[in-house]
Image (cartoon, rainbow, N blue to C red):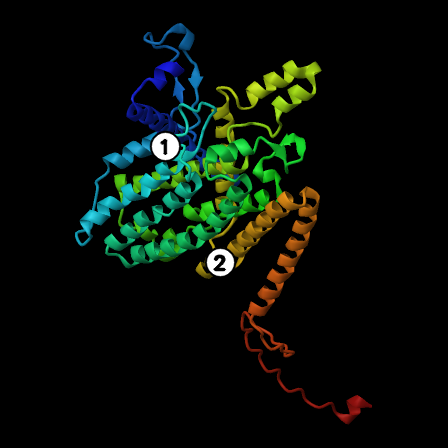
Amino acid sequence: MADWFSNLHPALQALIRVVLFILPIFLALPLVIWYERRLLSWMQDRIGPNRVGNITFSRTSRFVPDFLKGRKFKLFGIPQVLADGVKSFFKEDLAPTAVDRLLYFLAPAVFLFPAFLLGATIPWGPFRQLTPIADIDAGVLFIIAVSSLGVYGVVFAGYSSNNKYSLLGGLRSSAQLISYELGMGMSLAAIVMAAGSLRPTQILADQQGPLWGFVPVFANWNVLTPYGFIAAIIFFICMVAETNRAPFDLPEAESELVAGYNTEYSTKKWVLFMMGEYVGMLTYGTILATLFFGGYYLLPFPFGYLAATYPASADLWRILDWLNGNSILGPVWLFLKVYMVISGFIWMRATLPRLRYDQLMSLGWKSLLPLATANLIVVALWIVITRVYGPAWALLSVLVAAVILYFLYRAISRLNEPKDEVSTERRGIIMVDAAPRRPEPPQAPESPAVAS
């Protein structure tokens, strides 16, 4: 099979890689939408879609085989998503007369295309001939560059709709994505510097080495390192903002902008915007799992090293190594990690309220970007001192640098705080005015006889 694939034309090989990457995303898309609706219903004490697709065979019909009579088959509402999609394609497609028709119809495709393109350099299994689609040298830079293209679809939609709410949504999205791309880029720069490569495949291979460089019984998953843990949190927050998901859904805030940039879109074009959001969630989840959580490897243990170190149980370690990620089960483990990331997306939507616009910009510029920059400085310091003096001195130097950067950040934050004069005046607020009291009638003075 490998020889047959190697003898194919390079263009045909690339086409097969594309199909093997895109087809599972299309198949998983209805399941992700259904899972979000179900999980949100459980979190909000509702039922959610559970009726469509349930089949009950007749007990008396002569056209039903005996082994099926009276049996019930439940699909738990999964075909509800397919029914909604079919309904959307048969609805009347309306387009306002005053729109810029070229950009108006181009915007959904421009929004959807980068979501698929994001995963072109991400390996989804140990089969190097089939994945990734293109193992380019600047893979991480490619991811950052493509992620910035999604904003064009939103801006085109907002500008071409000739609607003030849509235009405001497009402007919000452009400012939001530019702000959070900086934090995302700095968080990925720390991982690239630690791995010494921009290739996602090389970063994944680097995560199979000894933890922190000197703990051989654990794999060096980036999320298990201090710098990788901080970078993973920053990257997760930034990718939620990049996909316009709650609580960062300011470009389509219904309480302020009706529906934001897609106010004037309906039926098939609106479905493309929704597909772009969910495909972005899947591809960003794949990137997060690959760069921070060991990719298609299930557990952070170097079973090959354990087999060589403990030969008495070498057969067990080899079996676990085969199950861990060196087999056809690798894509399954990657899907499970993406499933956990999608659950985090939904959990945040059900838990956190929408941020104000100033809070959203303040989080990106004043918190995430400085933290990612400090993390990058610490990683650079760790690498330099490790190569010159060794890991022990590097650990001590990194701790000292982290403490200094923390207190420096606190000092700068206090300088930027508004200095209000402390007021000692006490004020009260009456929420409801009390009804005026009626004056009491004057009492007659007591007579002296009664008083005696």
Of 309 and 169, nearer the camera is 309
- Find disc 2 in the rendering and name its residue: 365
Q: How far across and down, in percent of the image, does residue 251 sit?
A: 37, 53
In the image, taking residue 446 as reference, residue 83 lies left or right, namely left
Q: How far across and down, in percent of the image, does residue 423 sit?
A: 62, 78
- Find disc 1 in the rendering and name its residue: 81
Residue 65 lies in quadrant: top left
Q: Which mark is residue 312?
A: none
Residue 294 lies in quadrant: top right
Asked which secondary structure carries label 2, the reply is: helix
Task: Name the kind of residue labelled 1 in the image.
Answer: Val
Q: Would residue 288 be visible to someone looking at this image?
A: yes
Quadrant of the image containing the N terminus: top left
Residue 159 lies in quadrant: bottom left
Going 69% across and 21% down the picture, which residue do you hit?
A: 309
- Sequence-wise first label, 2 or 1: 1
Q: Badge 2, how many Cα within 10 Å: few under 14, some, many 20+?
A: some
